[in-house]
């Protein structure tokens, strides 16, 4: 079933579909009526429901269908899906801000994230440094100039200097 000819999004369920690992680390999907190679997974609600409503897209980024709940999948199928989502949505957790320097319209960070030193630049900190879900979580997300995301799980747990640095840019 292909959405380019159908008006309704199909539900992809364990009893009607099978995922497999393809060449180059891509996922493939086989349904009762079609085979798709190099599929992509996208979380519809990545912060609120990361395990639910996962959109499956073909190589042209057209929607094939949706996984309503990852909990429906078990064994190797679940492992494949979780590994792909983990790879796609990897967000290093910032443990400490070593420096943040403003130069020529960019904010250059050097941080300790997941035990490793990382450097990145941010353009327009008022849009690129924000609470993930205001009112629900105190987590902060920083998006760099290349679209990479970094998370501060709980800014209150940072050391004083790091906390003051990030609070300067939060609105």
Image: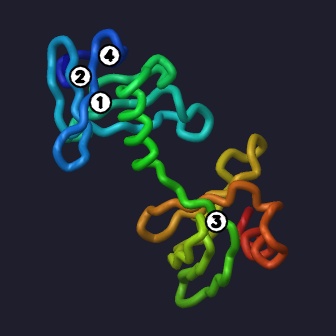
Mark 4 touches mark 1? (CB < 8 Å): no
Residue at 52% x, 74% y is 123
Closer-to-camera residue (89/129):
89
Q: Quadrant of residue 47?
A: top right
Alpha-carbon span between mark 4 and mark 3? 38 Å
Alpha-carbon span between mark 3 and mark 1? 33 Å
Q: Mark 3 or mark 1, which has the lower sequence index?
A: 1
Estimate how packed mark 2 is, as few (under 14), some (14 to 19) or many (20 or more) residues with alpha carbons within 10 Å.
few
Q: Which residue is mark 4?
A: 10
Using the image, tell me which numbered label, if any, was put on residue 127.
Answer: none
Nearer to us of marks 3 and 1 is: 3
Alpha-carbon span between mark 4 and mark 1? 9 Å
Mark 1 touches mark 2? (CB < 8 Å): yes
Q: Which residue is mark 3?
A: 94
Mark 3 touches mark 1? (CB < 8 Å): no
Estimate how packed mark 1 is, as few (under 14), some (14 to 19) or many (20 or more) residues with alpha carbons within 10 Å.
many
Mark 4 touches mark 2? (CB < 8 Å): yes
Residue 89 coordinates in the image, percent (x, y): 47, 48
Going by the image, does 23 lie left or right of 162? left
* Element under disc 2: loop
Q: Compared with residue 59, is residue 159 higher up or lower down, i.e. above or below?
A: below
Residue at 36% x, 15% y is 14
Q: What is the tally of numbered marks visible in this picture?
A: 4
Q: Compared with residue 135, is residue 139 higher up or lower down, i.e. above or below?
A: below
Using the image, tell me which numbered label, if any, was put on residue 63.
Answer: 1
* Element under disc 1: strand
């Amino acid at each position: 079933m292909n959405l380019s000819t159908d008006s309704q999004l199909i539900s992809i369920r364990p009893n009607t579909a099978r995922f497999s690992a393809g060449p180059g680390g891509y996922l493939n999907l086989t349904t009762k009526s079609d085979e798709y190679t190099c599929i992509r997974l996208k979380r519809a609600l990545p912060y609120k429901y990361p395990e639910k409503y996962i959109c499956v897209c073909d190589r042209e980024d057209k929607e094939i269908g949706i996984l309503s709940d990852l909990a429906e999948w078990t064994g190797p199928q679940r492992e494949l899906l979780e590994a792909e989502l983990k790879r796609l949505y990897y967000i290093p957790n910032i443990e400490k801000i070593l420096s943040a320097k403003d130069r020529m319209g960019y904010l250059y960070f050097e941080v300790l994230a997941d035990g490793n030193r990382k450097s990145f630049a941010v353009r327009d900190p008022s849009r690129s440094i924000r609470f993930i879900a205001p009112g629900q979580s105190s987590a902060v997300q920083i998006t760099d100039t290349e679209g990479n995301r970094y998370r501060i799980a709980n800014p209150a747990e940072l050391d004083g200097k790091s906390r003051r640095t990030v609070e300067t840019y939060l609105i």
